[in-house]
Amino acid sequence: MKIRSAVLVVAVACLSSSLFATDPEVQPKPSLTQPAISPDGREIAFASGGDIWTVSSNGGDAHLLVSNPATESRPLYSPDGTKLAFISTRTGGGDIYVLTLATGQLQRITYGDTEEQLDAWSPDGQWIYFSSADDDIDYNTDVFRVSAEGGTPMAVSDEAYLAEFESAPSPDGQAVVMMAKGISDLQWWRDGHSHIDDTELWWKSLDPHGTYRVVLPDDAKHAWPMWSAKGNKIYYMSDKTGPENIWSVAATGGPEKQITHFTDGRVLWPTIGDHGKTIVFQRDLAIWKLSTATGKAEGVPIALRGSPSGAGVRHVTASNFDDMALSPDGKKLAVIAHGDVFVTTEKSGGEAIQITHTPQTEADLHWSPDSTKLIYTSMRSGASNIYEYDFDTDKETQLTHGTAQDENLAWDPDGKSIAYTRDQKEVHLLTLETGKDVVLAADTMWFPTLKFSPAGDWLAYTNYGYDGFRNIKVIPTKGGTARPVTFLANGESANQIAWAPDGKYLLFATAQRSEDFDMARVDLTLHVPQYQENEFYNLFKTPSEPMQPKPPAPAKSAPNGEPTTAP
């Protein structure tokens, strides 16, 4: 229920924004995010529109510092204020770069396959701490540090099967604190509390044999730890009392103290600077600053002044795919990543071409038999409709409309029609050339599977009985009555169906609940019966002779002239 509530809140917020956009008195505001204050406290760097900007810590006109068609984010000043580290997607998923402010020299520092999370500089400016999911399982992040001049990253904390992230080295360089457990680093954007975001605050010695100590339990979403100048206190963000606020705790643990007392809005991406005197953070898409001495927080008035770089080639590195389809000719590969459809060559791979650009999700990829078209579903209208992309014309066509859920697609072997289910209650056949859409069967289905016979004259599908069992039915594609062909008392049948090349039988997997799956076969043509007496007489034939039933003995004449047979 919590996840559904969070989604509902987002949907309402988007609806409200679209309504307000029609009001001429409401002016759009830029998003100002991920601020960092310079060591001397005079300047704030932040991200907006995928670029890095700087502004006086008292506010005023902000000016572009780094602009690129790629996305730049998370700026952090070096301890001496001469350099700025940030994340850029200009070379793929997101690597760390360091800009020398006096000369404009830019150096790439990391070369990971996944997006790095820039955490902090070491107090002496020699190391950059970051979190990465490159080396752990299931996208769990570990903490690394790399020389500020570049080189091989070295693990600081790489516990398996859990995430460590958002690290901060102590002022004396002897220890590091970090967040651990939970997945709040992946979904920092979540508005509201969820148990999967609860995190612990760990302290770890940087000694080669250093040990861990839990400073805060996982009783809330804790994030972005920051050391005080003396190293005796740790500041962090927490939703311990509901709304997100800045808190503090002694470095050795103990009672927690709430610093800010916001009752609404969000506190994100806090960083500390100005010799520990000031914390800056994002709130309501604006930049705020907090005095650690007085606990007073106030917004920083900022006006953007500058012209960002124009749109260019956007590189997206994806390592998690929701669907994949190889074309029948074996030359093309289509995948879904980040909810969009990408295609590339099967042989050489390389950069893929993105053919959909929607905020909604695409799914269920299928190539046409001639490998020139793709069909898939999309939630663009709020419901699942079917779309076709023709590579000969580079054109996308919406095939179905309305509020019903059209899904579970299958191509006819001749490529002239597709089958699909509507609301898991009807099996449809759509002829592409004419647009004629007919209901082949009205049935009860639950996550159904559709599969055409090799000749395209029959369609097999899974139905869901009132008893909760899944079985297979077949129906002629030219119309007729659906016929059940399996009668198993299993609830996990036919998630995959395979026809024999000659169309005479079906193969499918079947199981009940948590049982192991068995492979089953159902024959669709009658067998010629084998009678026992024929099999017996065949035993007397040599292998070279045809196996035939033994004929009856020839008739003999009885003395009275009547025919008779041998016993």
Image (cartoon, rainbow, N blue to C red):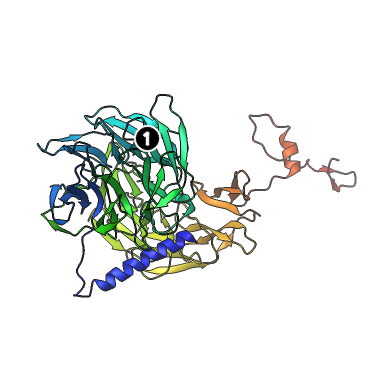
Q: Does 71 appear above or below 432? A: above
Callout 1 secondary element = strand
38 to 134, vertically: above or below: below
- Image quarter where the C terminus lies is top right
Using the image as rendered, state which of residue 546 and residue 188 is in the foreground. 188
Residue 143, by quadrant, is top left
Residue at the image point whose x is 49% and y is 52% from the top: 195
**Residue furthest top as drawn:** 208
Q: Which of these two is toward me, 196 or 80?
A: 80
- Left or right of 466 on screen, residue 213: left
Query: Mark 1 is on which residue type?
Result: Val
Residue 297 visible from this viewpoint? yes
Position of residue 329 in the picture relative to residue 543 (left or right): left
Q: Where is residue 276 in the image (x, y as percent from the top left)?
A: 28, 43
Dividing the picture into quadrants, the one containing residue 393 is bottom left
Q: Report whether 164 appears left or right of 558.
A: left
Q: How crowded is mark 1: few (under 14 residues within 10 Å), some or many (20 or more)?
A: many
Q: Nearer the viewer, residue 140 or 444?
A: 140
- Whole-percent x, y for residue 30 in the image: 21, 60
Q: Determine which quarter of the picture holds residue 471.
A: bottom right
Using the rendered image of the protein, determine whether residue 309 is visible from the camera's viewpoint: no
Identify which residue is drawn at 34% across, 49% down: 337
Q: Residue furthest front?
A: 294
Q: How many labels does the image show?
A: 1
Q: Picture coordinates of residue 373 (x, y %)?
A: 31, 53
Q: Name the residue under label 1.
A: 176
Residue 490 pos. (x, y %): 63, 53
